[in-house]
Amino acid sequence: MSNKERIIELLDVIPDYKIGYVLAYVQGVAADEETDDLFCQRMVENYENAPDEDKEDIPLEECMKEWGLA
């Protein structure tokens, strides 16, 4: 029996109130790196496009260095 078949088999014995936990975990495992990269890119673009009064006095480049992104 494959791992996938075993997981499907185990779903039948998991109580309904725990299925949400299983679903959340599987969705997290299924998410790919590209999704994370797109999210981060959007965050940078949002910052760059924000009005100056919404930005702190720390330059983006300095923050990126501090966070290990430069």
Image (cartoon, rainbow, N blue to C red):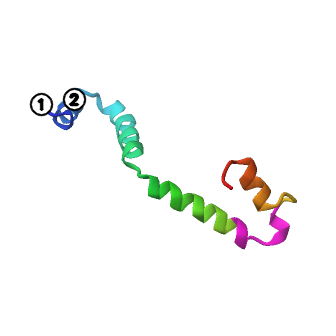
Give the spatial CA distance, label 1 vs label 2.
Answer: 12 Å
Question: Disc 1 vs disc 2: which is toward the camera?
Answer: 1
| Residue 36, position as x, y percentages in the image | 51, 54
Would you say residue 49 sits in the magenta stretch? Answer: yes
Residue 32 lies, in percent from the top left, at 41, 52
Q: Which mark is residue 1?
A: 1
The label on residue 10 is 2
> In the rendered structure, does residue 7 fall within the stretch colored magenta?
no
As drawn, is 70 to the left or to the right of 28? right
Circle 1: residue type? Met
* Predominant SS along the magenta part: helix
Q: Residue at x 39, y 38 (%)?
A: 25
Residues drawn in magenta: 47-55
Q: Quadrant of the C terminus?
A: bottom right
Residue 7 placed where, x, y %?
23, 33
Residue drawn at x 58%, y 58% as measured from the top left: 40
Tell me if 61 is positioned left or right of 13 in this view.
right
Residue 21, percent from left and from top: 39, 35
The foreground one among 57 and 12 is 57
**Element class at badge 1:** loop
